[in-house]
Amino acid sequence: MICMNLTIVYDDEPSDNPDLIADHGFSCWIESDDDVILFDTGSMGDILLHNLKHCGKDPSMISKIVISHEHYDHNGGLSLLLSRLHQAKVYRIDQRPSPSSIDTIAVNEPIHIAKGIFSTGRLPGNPLDEQSLILDVGDAVVALAGCSHSGVGNILEAAKQKGVVIGLIGGFHGFSAFEIITNLSFVCPCHCTAHKKKIHGLFPDMTRICQLGSTFDLDEMI
């Protein structure tokens, strides 16, 4: 089994830690046995770097960056972050210019990102297409979404290609078809989720709190 730990390093929801700066946007630090991957970069690079520092995360450890979609609150911190990295691979569904030391990979089809970590590939969305991540935790998988513009149901269907989906973490936007998540073991609504309180009320036992600085050990959650 691959050990995988997630830390929310950019989010709208304030932290109990006064050193962290809450801001509109999303970024999740993924640390596995073999890699450190940053999923999205929030809105502002200076806030992202500040929060990484105060979460005890060294940006130089990042080997891969995945941008879920090209809205400012998910890609806004990328330029400043890349200026601090000597090498990295960036996975985007829309090709954008990057420094020469950065390997930018255009994602359309589902693709292997790292050991146990896969992209859903480009999923049609409104107003933008989006990619989500599928995290293989052994006998099951967890989906990690940026804003779910492509629809929670479509993301879960894409994740099923890699195994039984037991969890969903990230921004759910205006998602309200709550019956879709009934059979999951846990959900963690973050960032842009419009109906956080409703989800917590309907699924109090399976809903995890997402706020800036939240950490999740996926081994303990399955």
Image (tube, helix red, strand yellow):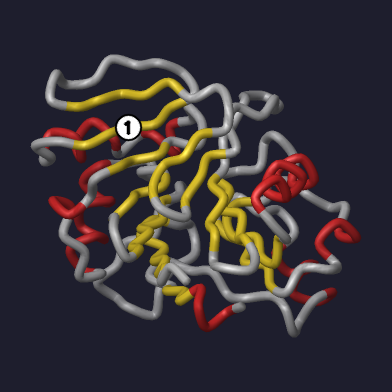
Q: Quadrant of residue 199?
A: bottom right
Residue appearing at x 29%, y 67% in the figure? 20
Kind of residue indicated by mark 1: Val
Give the residue at mark 1.
90
Left or right: residue 200 compared with residue 107: right
Left or right: residue 113 compared with residue 84: right
Front-lying residue, 58 or 201: 58
Count numbered badges in the picture.
1
Mark 1 element type: strand
Quadrant where the C terminus sits is bottom right
Q: Is residue 90 above or below residue 114?
A: above
Question: How far across and down, in percent of the image, does residue 113 sit?
Answer: 42, 41
Q: Is residue 177 above or below residue 206?
A: above
Residue appearing at x 49%, y 64% in the figure? 13
Left or right: residue 184 compared with residue 23: right
Question: How far across and down, in percent of the image, does residue 175 sit?
Answer: 78, 49
Q: Quadrant of residue 203?
A: bottom right
Disc 1 crowd rating (10 Å Cα; few below 14, some 14-19, many 20+) is many
Left or right: residue 116 compared with residue 168: left
Question: How far across and down, in percent of the image, does residue 201 sit?
Answer: 80, 76
Front-lying residue, 66 or 49: 66
Residue appearing at x 71%, y 53% in the figure? 194
Q: Quadrant of residue 85?
A: top left
Residue appearing at x 36%, y 58% in the figure? 29
Question: How far across and down, in percent of the image, does residue 158 sit?
Answer: 70, 41
